[in-house]
Amino acid sequence: MSKLLIVLCGILALIILLFIGFIVKPPSFKPKDLKAMETRMVQLPQNLPSPVERYYKTFFGYSPTEIETVVLSGRGRIKPFGIWMPCRFVFIHEAGWNYRHYIEATWFGIPIFKVNEGILDGKSFFEAPVGSLHDDPSTNQGANLALWAEAGWFPALWISDPRVEWKAVDESSALLFVPYGEERESFVVRFDPKTGRVDFLESMRYREAGEGKKKILWITRNENSPAGNSSVLATSSAMWLDQGSPWAYFTIEHALYNVDVQKLLRARGY
């Protein structure tokens, strides 16, 4: 066997090894034992747009449980460098105010790329091997949109928070206005005309940090969403319009609602 053939076989074996490593799914994080908080019921507001009212009455009834905090964990896949990588994650929310994402991309189940990001007290943060950011204006806007878009996993927030406003568009879509400091941002919320479920959200979001950047249409989609308040086994995707396909899929495998998250929000790992 020639030396060139040996080299080529070695390169092929390495490529196969790399490929297999990115197929293996990591174990999901085990839920922590967190102190439970009291729960309350939310009454449906009057004069909701028709697709919004249909959604809540169909899947949550007239009095869904108010969600003040949530810890969501599971697995998925992300494409930060143009290559799909399996990941495991924990998303911690103080609903409507603060959140933190902790994501580990893995190879053969071993963490090789860790991301700690979110927004606390109106200031965003991003920590990863490729760099760090804190309180960047463009990133603040994007993180605030993520804060409200992820309420699609606990949508009682969209009717319990007095700062939120719905406006009618048509029979299968509505505008959702959410706070952003002293201003407001908006989503177009599309509902499945057959089932009445939320299908996807659209918003104009900054993708890059720094001044002079342009907003890009950002789309988050419910790939499958079980009925009721449970978000377990829900899968959602996120994409930028100019990329044409999702860059991330997240599947929720464990969900804790209305628990004490203050320490976990300000941690760096899990």
Image (spheres, helix red, strand yellow):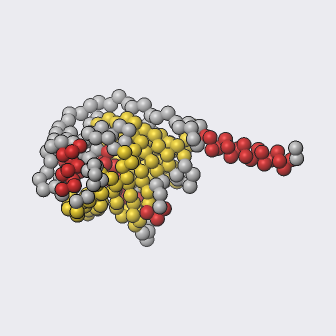
Which residue is outermost to the front? 194
- 260 over 237 or under it: above or below: above
Which image quarter holds the C terminus? top left
- 211 over 71 or under it: above or below: below
Which residue is outermost to the bottom? 212
Q: Position of residue 182 (x, y in %)?
A: 25, 62
Q: Which residue is drawn at 39% across and 60% down?
A: 218
Which residue is outermost to the left? 46
- The reply to whether residue 182 is in sight is no
Q: Where is residue 114 in the image (x, y as percent from the top left)?
A: 51, 44
Q: Which residue is drawn at 30% across and 53% down?
A: 192
Q: Residue at x 16, y 55 (%)?
A: 48
Q: Choose top left, top right, bottom left or bottom right for residue 91.
A: top left
Which image quarter holds the N terminus? top right
- The reply to whether residue 85 is in sight is yes
Which residue is outermost to the right? 2
Q: Choose top left, top right, bottom left or bottom right for residue 153.
A: top left
Q: Where is residue 234 in the image (x, y as percent from the top left)?
A: 37, 42
Q: In this view, does 245 lie to the left or right of 83?
A: left
- 96 over 17 or under it: above or below: below
Q: Where is residue 198 in the image (x, y as percent from the top left)?
A: 29, 51
Q: In this view, does 136 lie to the left or right of 197?
A: right
Q: Residue at x 20, y 62 (%)?
A: 168
- Give 68 or 199, whichever is nearer the viewer: 199
How many marks can you see? Answer: 0
Q: Choose top left, top right, bottom left or bottom right for residue 164.
A: bottom left
